[in-house]
Amino acid sequence: MKKIFLLSLSLGLFACGENGNTKAQETETTPENDTVQKISVVTIPEEQLTTAEYEYEVVVPGLDIAWGMDFLPDGSMLITEKSGELIHFKNGQKQQVQGAPEVYNRGQGGFLDVALSPNYQSDGWIYFTYASSAGEGEGGNTELMRAKLENNQLTNKEVLYKAVPNSTRGQHFGSRIDFDNEGHLYFSIGDRGDRDVNPQDLTRDGGKVYRLNLDGSIPQDNPYVGVSGAKEAVFSYGHRNPQGMIFNSDTNEIWVHEHGPQGGDEINVVKKGANYGWPLVSYGINYDGTSFTDETSGPDFEDPIYYWVPSIAPSGFAHVTSDKYPDLKGDILVGSLKFQYVEHLTLDGKKVTAREKILENIGRVRDVVQSPDGHIYVSVEGKGIVKILPKQ
């Protein structure tokens, strides 16, 4: 795939998760390797969105914006509050963990994701992303840290990556964390509201998915290792603001979903060195209804496997592998901030074939996680964390 560097584009700045047209579109894409089966770009219009009835119970009440969560081996839960608190929920009680990182709480920035190491039983590492004001310049940018939890205190804290430059803009910090099964950590950073510069410039942070080894070192097979001036931690680029990330164990791939502008939220299969085109191609439009690009695809860009028009403002992402939910198993769940439900997308391989709402009108959904015991938990802003109850 051809790599391009663009320092500036004559395009305006706008935010995510707004309405657009509802016309369904489907196009064929040609992968870099012509022997790979073509994957259709799909959207399913709102009139085909069905509703499924699931009951839930509130497990952790009294939270404001619980941005991320993960589960310790004893079944207790670590929860990040966007404002900066790290909460350990155990035996029905919330305790504030001491020594949490200092966060830059502005706009969409704050304490973001939390994820236990895939080797947690042996290494004890916990990974966090958050907006940080560390470094030169006013404002902040996304930072990745790992630490250990001892006696309700974070210890052995190590900053593994800090994006630059700092900015006082409040948009598009990302950021989710996940792992493949080969010892790599992936995390996302949004374009930081500087779409004209960051996403298409490999010498700058922002608008990227990054890949590191678990100790924070850069894998030598990353696509831009040795490329002069490039950020060697970058694995893919041309992203807008990914706030959902999963390792799809059925396909052995990292998938992300990301906010579009007005229309054009996307699900992308993350590929080494791929350019996802933002802002040169998009299914979204400007807020005034005008188009900022006439292109939805191009030979230099990797197409999404799915997009939403209108935007649902996606946050949180889960690949369901649990036997507790037979109707959901093998499919994906996406939280909707804008429309306040969890969206169930039925998969046939990498193609989305149906969509339905569950937990309709529950509130702004920030995160969706399948726990080690197979239950699905959902973070709802202003409500707390709820557990979806399997159907009897």
Image (tube, helix red, strand yellow):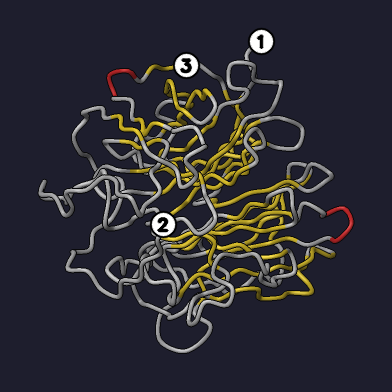
Indicate the position of residue 272 as horizontal and vertical percent values.
54, 56
Residue type indicated by callout 3 = Ala
Marks 3 and 1 sit apart, C-alpha to C-alpha, by 14 Å
Measured Cα–Cα span from mark 3 to mark 2: 36 Å
Q: Which quadrant holds residue 277?
A: bottom left
Residue at the outermost front position: 35
How packed mark 2 is, by other alpha carbons closer than 10 Å (few <14, some 14-19, many 20 or more), is many
Amino acid under disc 1: Gln
Disc nearer the start of the sequence (3/2) = 3
Instruction: Give residue 52's mark.
Output: 3
Task: Kindly tell me whether residue 382 is visible in this rendering.
Answer: no
The answer to whether residue 391 is above or below residue 248 is above
Q: Is residue 195 above or below residue 49?
A: below
Residue at the spot x=58%, y=46% of the render? 254
291 is higher (above) or lower (below) than 218 = above
* CA gap, disc 1 and disc 2: 45 Å
Residue that badge 1 annotates: 392
Mark 2 element type? loop
Residue at the extreme right: 122
Q: Residue at x 67, y 37 (%)?
A: 249
Horizontal relation, residue 120 to residue 211: left or right: right
Disc 2 marks a residue whose amino acid type is Asn
User: Mark 2 highlights which residue?
Assistant: 275
Mark 1 or mark 2, which has the lower sequence index? Answer: 2
Say which residue appears at 58% left-offset and 56% top-offset.
113
The x, y position of residue 298, in whole percent, is 30, 49
> Are the residues flagged by discs 3 and 1 in contact, CB closer than 8 Å?
no
Q: Which image quadrant: the N terminus?
A: bottom left
Q: Which residue is the extreme one toward the bottom? A: 136
